[in-house]
Image (tube, rainbow, N blue to C red):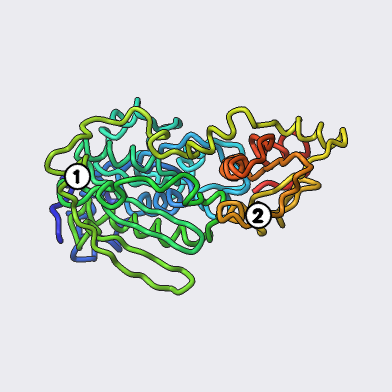
Amino acid sequence: MSLPPLVEPAAELTRDEVNRYSRHLIIPDVGMTGQKRLKNAKVLCVGAGGLGSPALLYLAAAGVGTLGIIDFDIVDESNLQRQIIHRQSSLGVAKAESAAATVREVNPLIDVKVHNTALDRDNVLEIFSQYDLILDGTDNFATRYMVNDAAVLLGKPYVWGSIYRFDGQASVFWAEHGPCYRCLYPEPPPPGMVPSCAEGGVLGVLCASIGSIQTTEAIKLLAGIGDPLVGRLMIYDALEMTYRQVKVRKDPECPLCGKNPTITELMEDYEAFCGAVSEEASEAAQDSTITVTELKAMQDGGEDIFLIDVREPNEYEIVSIPGATLIPKGEFLNGNALAGLPQDKKIVLHCKSGVRSAEALAVVKNAGFADAVHVGGGILAWIRQIDPSQPTY
């Protein structure tokens, strides 16, 4: 369905702007009026990572007059495989600052606002209120639900994208004209059910495919052209090179945007709502978590332990802790790993950061291995504190 333009046009385009945006101006559906609307628009990009990188570059090139960038992270080497807005020279620099510098090089005629902070329930409404449209490039469910809720409460359109390995999704959520994110996903997935990109990986160029869809949708909404992805979910499979659409209807019983909403303000704790770690895993790890220095002391002291790496085989190939046996977490969840565990050794589990090993620990303890433990911080902590010569990922 076509929607009215999101913003009014600016008063004029300068000579430099006409020269720069001439290929837009000769498109009848955009023209001078559409480009003036882009000039007058204010768009916030949540995250300057995989999706934020192409989105920010193309929004800047398109002439969106005010671009906001919010990100609290710093650039590290693993980002450069897909986060094309950053450079080798940006390593160690705040992502928001690095992205802003690149955007200003792409288009010095626009205004760039940097929010070098973590988005949370205390600042999200104040920050969002400064912009016409929100483009979400985050990679965790807690932030997605918070972004959606804030956008609905403020009446803002929310352009959403998601990526994982070779698959991507994109849609536009705007409660005034269609469904919100909660209409599509009323509840977050169970903890540990959906791996993050840091755990499962992502094809770098997939970010460009989904990020460009998000940017296209943002431009259409701002200029009032075309048929936005409101009420439609676009699903992309890079391996099969296929796109398909799924209709998403507004849920009349949605607790946020339905007929009788019960969510009328931001939730107190989105992390708890999404549960990064299940309650069982949290309880299992409560008094059964050791540090990497304690693990190293066990190994150096000749303690009789059975160290298990619960990551995936491709992760194990990248880097491993000496003496660890690979048994992926899935083997614990389906019960296949339990029969092979030694009864006469202390079970010590680890993963990349400590989340998956905590999930496996709950299974192991329920199977009767009461003295089993897991390593807090996982192999990343091992590399930082014990063996910095090892590669990270």
Q: Which mark's residue is nearer the viewer, 1 or 2?
A: 2
- Front residue of 24/254: it is 254
The picture places residue 174, in percent across and down from the top left corner, at 21, 48
- Front residue of 313/215: it is 313
Estimate how packed mark 1 is, as few (under 14), some (14 to 19) or many (20 or more) residues with alpha carbons within 10 Å: some
In the picture, measured across the screen, residue 151 lies left or right of residue 213, that is: left
Can residue 16 be seen in this snapshot?
Answer: no
Quarter holding the N terminus? bottom left
The picture places residue 64, in percent across and down from the top left corner, at 30, 47
Q: Earlier in the sequence, mark 1 or mark 2?
A: 1
In the picture, measured across the screen, residue 242 lies left or right of residue 304, that is: left
Q: CA distance from mark 1 to mark 2?
A: 64 Å
In the picture, measured across the screen, residue 122 lies left or right of residue 226, that is: right
* Residue at 22% from the left image edge and 53% from the top image edge: 221
Secondary structure type for disc 1? loop
Q: Amino acid at mark 2?
A: Ala
- Residue at the outermost top position: 122
Can residue 62 be seen in this snapshot?
Answer: yes
Q: Amino acid at mark 1?
A: Ala
Reading the image, the residue beneath label 2 is 337
* Residue at 59% from the left image edge and 33% from the top image edge: 285
- Front residue of 249/285: it is 285
The picture places residue 14, in percent across and down from the top left corner, at 26, 48
Instruction: Verify CB contact (< 8 Å) between mark 1 and mark 2.
Output: no
The picture places residue 266, in percent across and down from the top left corner, at 28, 31
Secondary structure type for disc 2? loop
Estimate how packed mark 2 is, as few (under 14), some (14 to 19) or many (20 or more) residues with alpha carbons within 10 Å: some
Residue 210 against residue 110 in the figure, above or below: below
Reading the image, the residue beneath label 1 is 10
Residue 81 against residue 269 in the figure, above or below: below
